Image (cartoon, grey):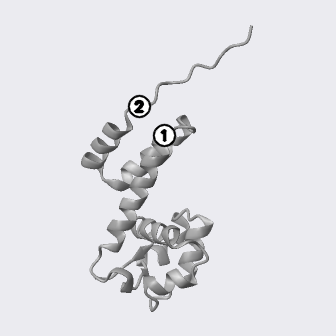
């Protein structure tokens, strides 16, 4: 007799995401949702919340005073201890484009990735303190 896998009921993502955002912020919430994707790989509501959080991160990244004219620079921490950063291939490529003179709008033109992915990866690099964006 074959065993029928019993699927877990999906959590109430709206409540969990709302509570996590309020208590821990967007990056912690994003990390927790990415972990949850392993446990619930076919949960479309979860995928939707991941995209909502990614959009929130990009929107917050662009709310800085200079917006698209901001010029990212490699941080001193990255330059002195770059091996501590576990960069993806996309993040590494973006790091290679940052020269301290080009603004975000020019980086979007040079980046081979779609604009949203480029902005999300720049926001992630800023969050991890690999780059800084002077005000």
Give the residue displayed 49% in from the left and 46% down from the top.
47
Quarter of the image with the N terminus is top right
Q: Is residue 104 left or right of residue 3?
A: left
Give the residue displayed 55% in from the left and 69% down from the top.
91
Q: Is residue 98 visible?
A: no
Locate residue 24, reporting x and y percent: 29, 49
Q: Mark 1 Cα within 10 Å, few/some/many (few <14, many 20+)?
A: some
SS label for mark 2: loop
Which picture quadrant has residue 70?
Answer: bottom left
Which picture quadrant has residue 52?
Answer: bottom left
| Residue with the mark numbered 2 | 11
Locate residue 116, reporting x and y percent: 49, 69
SS label for mark 1: helix
Of 101 and 111, nearer the camera is 111
**Residue 111 to residue 84: above or below:** below
Which residue is situated farthest in the top direction here? 1
Q: Is residue 8 left or right of residue 24?
A: right
Give the residue displayed 43% in from the left and 87% down from the top.
103
Q: Which mark is residue 106?
A: none
**Residue 135 to residue 34: above or below:** below
Of 91 and 43, nearer the camera is 43
Of 132 and 105, nearer the camera is 105
Which residue is situated farthest in the right direction here? 1
| Residue with the mark numbered 1 | 36
Q: Mark 2 Cα within 10 Å, few/some/many (few <14, many 20+)?
A: few
The tally of labels here is: 2
């Amino acid at each position: 007799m074959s065993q029928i896998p019993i699927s877990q009921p999906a959590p109430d993502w709206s409540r969990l995401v709302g509570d996590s955002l309020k208590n821990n912020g967007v990056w912690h919430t994003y990390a927790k949702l990415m972990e949850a994707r392993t446990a619930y790989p076919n949960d479309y509501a979860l995928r939707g919340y991941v995209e909502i959080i990614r959009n929130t991160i990009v929107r917050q990244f662009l709310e800085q005073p200079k917006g698209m004219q901001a010029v990212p620079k490699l941080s001193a921490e990255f330059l002195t201890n770059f091996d501590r950063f576990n960069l993806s291939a996309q993040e590494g490529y973006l790091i290679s484009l940052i020269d301290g003179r080009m603004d975000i709008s020019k980086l979007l033109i040079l980046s081979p990735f779609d604009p949203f992915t480029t902005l999300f990866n720049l926001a992630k690099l800023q969050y991890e303190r690999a780059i800084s964006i002077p005000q």
